[in-house]
Amino acid sequence: MQNRPFDHGELNVPNRLRHLDRDLERHRRELERQERAERKRRTEEMKALREKAKVLLAEWEPRILERYGPKHGKRALSKMLRSDAYFNPEVPIRLCERMAREA
């Protein structure tokens, strides 16, 4: 045995690290559970927005094409609106709501 000074830090290391892996795994599982719940919430929200955009476009697309079609091209505008209704549904929703306010 060596004559070294007594170090309380060395004394406590095994007790502090005994359940470290278990605690880290529990923490990771909890984070994954929260991320899954958040992803599911965002997915449901996006589905609802897509459906709303689809319904609004079915009603307002002819008027939007009539108003903005000559400037941007009816076919290109229709294609863009349908694409946005899926990938970025807030844009057609805002456009339809603005058209409704102006009408």
Image (spheres, rainbow, N blue to C red):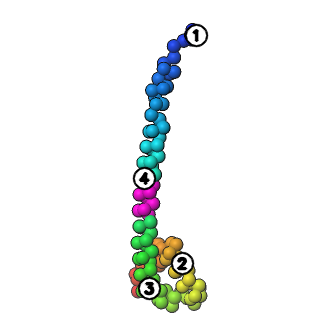
Q: Quadrant of residue 96?
A: bottom left
The span picked out in magenta is 34-42
Assign the magenta stretch its main secondary structure. helix
**Secondary-structure class at tag 1:** loop
Q: Which residue carries the number 4 mark?
A: 33
Q: Characterize the local packing of mark 4: few (<14), some (14-19) or many (20 or more) Cα atoms within 10 angstroms.
A: few
Of labels 1 and 4, the one closer to you: 1
Q: Give the CA separation, mark 4 to mark 3.
A: 38 Å
Residue found at x 44% / y 48%? 29
Residue found at x 48% / y 20%? 11
Residue found at x 47% / y 23%? 12
Q: Give the CA separation, mark 1 to mark 4.
A: 49 Å
Mark 4 in CB contact with mark 3 (< 8 angstroms): no
Mark 1 in CB contact with mark 2 (< 8 angstroms): no
Q: Is residue 75 left or right of residue 101?
A: right
Q: Quadrant of the C terminus?
A: bottom left
| Mark 1 or 4, nearer chain start | 1
Q: Which residue carries the number 3 mark?
A: 58
Q: Characterize the local packing of mark 2: few (<14), some (14-19) or many (20 or more) Cα atoms within 10 angstroms.
A: few
Q: Indicate the amino acid at tag 3.
A: Ala
Q: Which residue carries the number 2 mark?
A: 83
33 drawn magenta: no
Q: Which residue carries the number 1 mark?
A: 2
